[in-house]
Amino acid sequence: MLEKIDLSKKMEKEEYKRRGEALALKLGKLQRECKALKIPVMIVVEGLSAAGKGTLINELIEPLDPRGFTVYAIKEETEEEHMRPFLWRFWNITPEKGRIAILDSSWYRRVSEEYFDGYTTDKQLGEAYDEIKNFERQLTDDGMVIIKLFNFISKDEQKKRMRKLLDSKETAWRVTDGDLKRNKNYKDYVEICEEMLRRTDSAYAPWEVVEATDRRFAVIKVLTIVADALERQVEKYKTKKEPVIDSQLEKDQVISSSSLKKADLTKALTREEYTARKKELQDRLSMLHNVLYRKRIPVVLGFEGWDAGGKGGAIKRLTQALDPRGYAVHPTASPNDIEKAHHYLWRFWTNMPKAGHVAIFDRTWYGRVMVERIEGFCSTEEWSRAYTEINDMERHLANSGAIVLKFWMQIDRDEQEKRFRERQANPDKNWKITEEDWRNREKWDAYEIAVDEMLIRTSTTYAPWIIVEGNNKYYARIKVLETVVDAIETYLKKRGDD
């Protein structure tokens, strides 16, 4: 692929000036239109060392309003980033709608420089390619423009530029030992880059190779590529149809699958049985939390269920056994304005735990395929693709070494009504019950259909759903504790840890 690129392309000064001035005006206008239409943009600038990435970024941002973009220089992972899933730091910097993020290097370090240097294993390489493609597809499906530029120069040109940088004390620091090693093994590194380009080139996030020998030619090509991509997206937004809002909840109850109806809600424990089992399991969980921290194993626990289904009680019995420095509980409410300006998974990615810590989500990313679907807060297309997006995210967490468990707290309608009335009658608990809770009861059948579909389509070996029979609170709390303890012990045994 790259050996076919004509690196002799040049542009005369007069043409450069003429085209550059026109493109600068166009880019300024397109930035304003993207802001008005709330179009998020990510521009990824990759390429060989000394190929002029910094120069091109400077030329690109010159015509832009600096209040509307952020430039990120992506270096080696920090200690904090190394303890998170691979894409965590990139989810954190995805721009809100209407803003532009420009990345000097990116998530592609994992499959290029880090692979060349031996930090990425062959197994991690395959996983990273899948995760990158899923990441880019999720963002572009949500309306983001991803522009990927690969700056390319010859081995001799690269060597000449590096020598020039090394000759000055002011610029020598810009050439690393890694840069010199990649130039020495230019052919091998270019083959890795070619594989990267081939495996991640897509209709939704295509690669553009920039012939970077001549600065003027490279600048005009980059400005043209960015302007054309933004122009296409602006036109697409201006002509797009109103999204279809349809929860599609009618089902033939005779032939449809149902996980919830199989739950045996008569299961119960006495207070004495509960007290004894709780102490035993919490003691084991407390010990295991130390092992998780020592072995740097993250845990993600998600709780969903009917209103008054017992999520809070189950979470409390878990956290009683955990060191407060090693866990966080994240209650999920309706998204605020900042969260709405990002991909719906963004607010969950930013709260994923680092290695050795536990993250507990009281309500989760599954709101997209339940309340948002049923209440019409997202389009049919959005909730339909969410199953795949969620499975991809959870697979990425598992690939990074996390234990992922999801609990559905199941009760019947009569038990829910009983708990609602008890809350209303108790001055210390009536804050827990709202008119919205009563209204949601009227949509029980719709939610049941949506939940069944969710359980079937997103329960996986790496992130299973556990239905917790919750009419008896003692039984439910013990089942949650037991499931978490067993999952951690099984994971440690599989790893060969004591």
Image: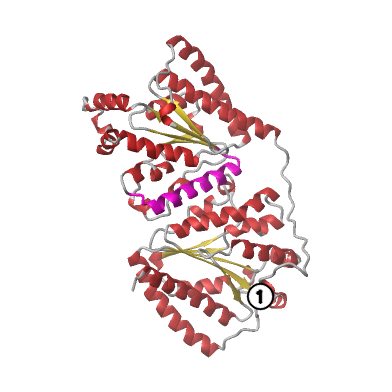
Query: Residue flagged by tag 1: what amino acid is it?
Result: Ile
- Residue under label 1, please give it: 411
Measuring 46% from the left and 37% from the top, which residue is drawn there? 197
Q: Is residue 59 left or right of residue 256?
A: left
Specify the quadrant of the image occupied by residue 333: bottom right
Task: In this rendered view, identify the residue nearer to me: 398 or 143.
Answer: 398
Magenta region includes residue 121: yes
209 lies left or right of 119: right
Q: Work out which quarter of the rendered image holds the N terminus and state it.
A: top left
Q: Is residue 217 left or right of residue 416?
A: left
Asked whether residue 342 appears in the rendered view, the answer is no
| Residue at left offset 50%, top offset 28% | 65
**On the rendered structure, is 458 left or right of 21?**
right
Q: Is residue 141 magenta?
A: yes
Q: Position of residue 163 (x, y in %)?
A: 24, 26
Q: Is residue 481 visible?
A: yes
Does the magenta stretch mainly form a helix, a strand or a loop?
helix
Q: How is the image coloured?
A: secondary structure
Frontmost residue, 200 versus 342: 200
Rendering coords of residue 410 (x, y %): 64, 73
Compared with 145, 368 (above or below) is: below
Q: Secondary structure at mark 1?
A: loop
Look at the image and give the residue range highlighted in magenta. 119-145
